[in-house]
Image (cartoon, rainbow, N blue to C red):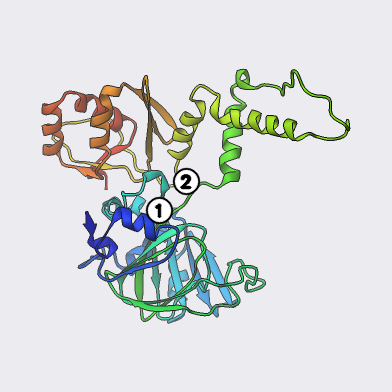
Amino acid sequence: MKLDLLGGITAQQFLDEYWQQKPLLVRQAFPNIKTPFSPEELAGLTCDTETSSRIIIEHGKTPWQVKHAPFTEKDFTSLPDTHWTLLINDLEHYYPELQNILQKFRFLPDWRIDDLMVSYAADQGTVGPHLDEYDVFLIQLEGKRRWQLDSDVDTEKLVPDISLKILEEFTAENDWILEAGDMLYLPPNLAHYGVAQGGCMTYSVGFRAPDREALLSAWLDEFNEHPELNQRYGDAKRQIQPSASEISQRDIQQLKAMMRNMLDDNGGLFESFLARHLSESAATAFSLEDENPSFEEFTDYLKNPTKRLTWIEHENGLDVFIEGNALPMPLSHKEALITLTDSMEYNAQTIAELIQADPIYLELMGTLVAQGFFISADIE
């Protein structure tokens, strides 16, 4: 199905031709997009809660001054009229209804989504020319922002003596002005430079991928919890070699095979580790929890934006994980699990109809509410 969100191409065509390869500009990907908060409300949020947020001021006390939350009212009243930006991560945690934005991108798996960040910038506000190691969809929410791209930069040449990784040299290859509703997709490691044209707001939907070092470190921690899987190198029927100091190619290949067996020959442990590990979202000081998490009929429910659920299927059932907590389920729950995790919100009538059609939904809703994956819509 062709999607207006992606400029009239299918999700698969986007994945084949653009994802992690080249940028895509879509005019009016979000027509009539609404702003659910004011700049003043965003500022208040960073003063009242433990948000992951920062203010970046160009030509402040230093060429690129960075302040980190928590902020006070004075931090905002003392800002200059231009050349500053407020960035707030995990915005969907504080405004759960913004999960409807994330829902648009669920042709990609949930474990790849990092967060929804908002940038509010005064005129000429910017974080400088830089590149990121992750995919991002930039959605213009309010006002205008100029975006320039450069695919051929020297990543080693950074502005010296500052905490930000700002590129020292940048030559624009593309130059676009985004207005409210426009969207720009950027693959990883593509240099970009956004500058506010008057006051503006921009959403950034970020997609992080686990890096090899972090994944290997986490897997070794898991593997070490199972000493029964450990094994020593064996070399029965080995051949005489000309030099005792040489490590033969045969030995190298067998040692590689032993290491690969850590992933393949473990009774499904690695698959379960992956599902659990990828269900663990980044730590945050903010949480949304019902005081008494138990399913109640005639109640509207939202997916908890601070919780992530993953699952894998094997011949004996489903291994379901919510924030690293295991919930084994029978295969008979698969269809209901897919249905219930396919949307970010459910009204009471829809839930009642599902339960009436199949009692499995009652059991599963009870489990997901008890685990905090679904929360009452009234908790907002």
Q: Position of residue 90 (x, y in %)?
A: 40, 54
The image quarter containing residue 221 is top right
| Left or right of residue 352: residue 122 | right
Around disc 1, counting alpha carbons within 10 Å, would you say few (fewer than 14), some (14 to 19), or many (20 or more)?
many
Q: Position of residue 378 (x, y in %)?
A: 22, 44
The image quarter containing residue 370 is top left
Q: Amino acid at mark 1?
A: Asp
In front: 3, or 274?
Answer: 3
Residue located 45% across and 39% down the image: 278
Residue 117 shows up from this direction: no
Instruction: State the quadrant of the N terminus.
Output: bottom left
Q: Earlier in the sequence, mark 2 or mark 1?
A: 1
Q: Is residue 119 above or below residue 13?
A: below
Return the mark for residue 115.
1
Residue 202 shows up from this direction: yes
Q: Are marks 2 and 1 in contact (CB under 8 Å)?
A: yes
Q: CA distance from mark 2 to mark 1?
A: 9 Å
Q: Amino acid at mark 2?
A: Ala
Residue on which the image places disc 2:
282
Q: Is residue 1 above or below residue 336?
A: below
Return the mark for residue 261.
none
In front: 189, or 305?
Answer: 189
| Left or right of residue 270: residue 32 | left
Q: Secondary structure at mark 1?
A: strand
In front: 357, or 59?
Answer: 357
Around disc 2, counting alpha carbons within 10 Å, would you say few (fewer than 14), some (14 to 19), or many (20 or more)?
few
Q: Secondary structure at mark 2?
A: loop
